[in-house]
Image (cartoon, rainbow, N blue to C red):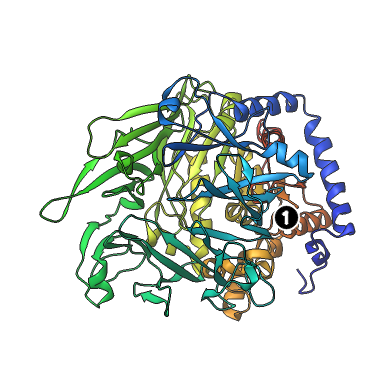
Amino acid sequence: MPEQDPYAWLEDVDSEAALAWVGERNAETVAALTADPAFEGLRDAVREVLDDTARIPYVVRRGGHLYNFWRDHDRPLGMWRRTTLDEYRSPAPRWETLLDVDALAEAEGVRWVWAGATVLRNGPPRALVELSRDGADATVVRELDLDRGAFVEDGFRLPEAKNAVDWIDEDHVFVATDTGPGSLTDSGYPRTVRRWHRGTRVGDAPVVFAGAADDVSVGAWHDPAPGFERDLAVRHRDFWHSEFFLLAEDGEPVRIEVPADCEPQLHHEQLLVRLRSPWLGQPAGSLLAFPLDAFLAGERTYEVLFTPDERTVLEEFTTTRSRLVLTTLTDASTQLHLLSPEPGGGWSRSPLGEVPPLATATVTATSPYEDDETAEEVLFDVGGFLQPSALRRVVAGRPGVETLRRAPARFRTEGLCVRQHFARSADGTRVPYFVVGPEDRDGPAPTLLYGYGGFEISLTPVYSAVTGRSWLERGGTYAVANVRGGGEYGPAWHRAALGARREAAFDDFAAVAQDLVARGITTPGRLGASGGSNGGLLTGVMLTRHPELFGAVVSEAPLLDMARYHRLLAGASWTAEYGDPEVPEERAHLLRWSPYHNLRTGHGSPPLLLTTSTRDDRVHPGHARKMAARMRQLGLPFEYFENTGGGHSGASDHGDAAFLEALVHTFLWRELGEERRVPE
């Protein structure tokens, strides 16, 4: 396409002309898809799943209470609430409502969306609550009195910004926010951290830590571990390289001299380091433990807590008061392991609960800062594509696993099975993928292939009642591709698709599509590609590079203009993932696969559905808008829907989410439900 972008005007998010254009495209798409006879029933089925009062209310512990945020039909914006463990064990727990977001939104005339809360430890019952205006990443912060369920008059309060706050004590917080010129990075995140005293202006609070303008962001937090209280800060130089510091109340920050691409964590007297590249003779993906004081003094003696192999990697780790919980992946399925310190030194390792094959176990909460046995508590969730989630509880050091909650089965699974296959990518790499569909196939079926392939994010088997109701119950087959760029095989799997090597992720996804056809699971005309955000980029590349492989493509909240992504909202923070368009050789590889720049006629194009949100302040809606405008100019088939709210998720409540899911699956079934001829 010409260097001069004819659709740059659509990047002006709230301009009258751009919103008028959005309104026209929305009207076209809504009219076309809601006219389908199955649309209303599909939307109602999804809404029923989302509002289901029998679903698991996931909780975190703070002191004697378990906290939960809950949405349902009667509370579409939701309520923050708490209960006790004994109550939670009962069939119908009694909850104490702390904040009714629907009531607040009605009283203030603002569509507030819950964005989280931080509870003060070892002080009065207070929390710093974050609220987003219609789902954006930017939030306001208010201090809430938990006993009264009311905001604290003259308490800590911040206006809308990309805020980060953490309690130090009752009267002090760390705050990273927009305080005027020079306080933000080029990516739009805070550049400075202040130590803010109650009752003073945030702009007058002393700066205790600062980064550079071309950093992504900075932050600081208080470690409240009893006997090991300390303050820490981080400077995120780019998405994959950071510097960590101990903060002294009087004096310069002390850098913790670990590799910039690793993940460090302090646990009492130890420094835990998960490696992303080889260090001290240990391979990438290892987990090492150092005595902290000795490390700060220059010693590098360590214990190896985990070493990866070809098939098994460390997905994440978390802590209880005295133990570690490791989550490992073997061919994209998980296991949990408990590491306990031995009296004479070293660690013993044992399984934490049973996880069936082709399933996912996730630690949902620990409470290492409590002062009783709950400091060793681990809550973890186990589920799979056809296995509803079960929330389980273990107290490390005590026998037994308690099942606290089981989610109900919300779609029919009779005759369905889960299989794992491996495709061969263009360079011979073995790429795993999951297939959920009929155990006994009667010929090729409509198949939806989902992928992400970036930022070291792993895709594992999870139970989705929305996919079950919207796709599997209608006779569709669902597939998930574990392409390079993700974390399924550790840091090396991610680096294999970093920057100029991004082609590997695209080749992997195409190889999985071809393998699905070769196995007779589907045909190109009945195969759809779906992804969001970075996954929207992935499917956008499939549209322009491999139109012959797909009968339909869905791209949600996508990156699509890779020549200007770094200039749009948070885009500058991702140059370490994709490359910098300001560097000529990196711009060249970005333009080779930028979907917006590779649209053309004469090679055929499967129908595309683009979705985004006006309130997405992470991935600019201009990506989807400009893609749709250019497709319209070229006469290529597309549908476009932009929710006015919802932020990066595209929906701020269950009603919006159900409508969006119904649009997506109506589009997919319309295009893939019957055999279609693919472009030549």
| Location of residue 205 by image quarter | bottom right
Query: Residue 314 at x, y = what percent?
Result: 33, 53
Q: Nearer the viewer, residue 630 or 254?
A: 254
Q: Is residue 510 left or right of residue 261?
A: right
Q: Would you call the spot at circle 1 few (<14 residues within 10 Å), some (14-19), or many (20 or more)?
A: many
Residue appearing at x 36%, y 61% in the figure: 229
Disc 1 marks which residue? Answer: 624
Residue appearing at x 77%, y 24% in the figure: 37
Q: Nearer the viewer, residue 34 or 111?
A: 111
Under mark 1, the amino acid is: Ala
Q: Nearer the viewer, residue 587 or 386?
A: 386
Residue appearing at x 56%, y 70% in the figure: 575
SS at mark 1 in the image: helix
| Location of residue 304 by image quarter | bottom left
Q: Is residue 545 visible?
A: no
Tell me: residue 566, above or below residue 355: below
Q: Is residue 298 left or right of residue 530?
A: left
Query: Residue 390 at x, y = what percent?
Result: 41, 29
Q: Quadrant of the N terminus?
A: bottom right
What residue occupies the far left of the structure in this picture? 344
Tell me: residue 91, above or below residue 463: above
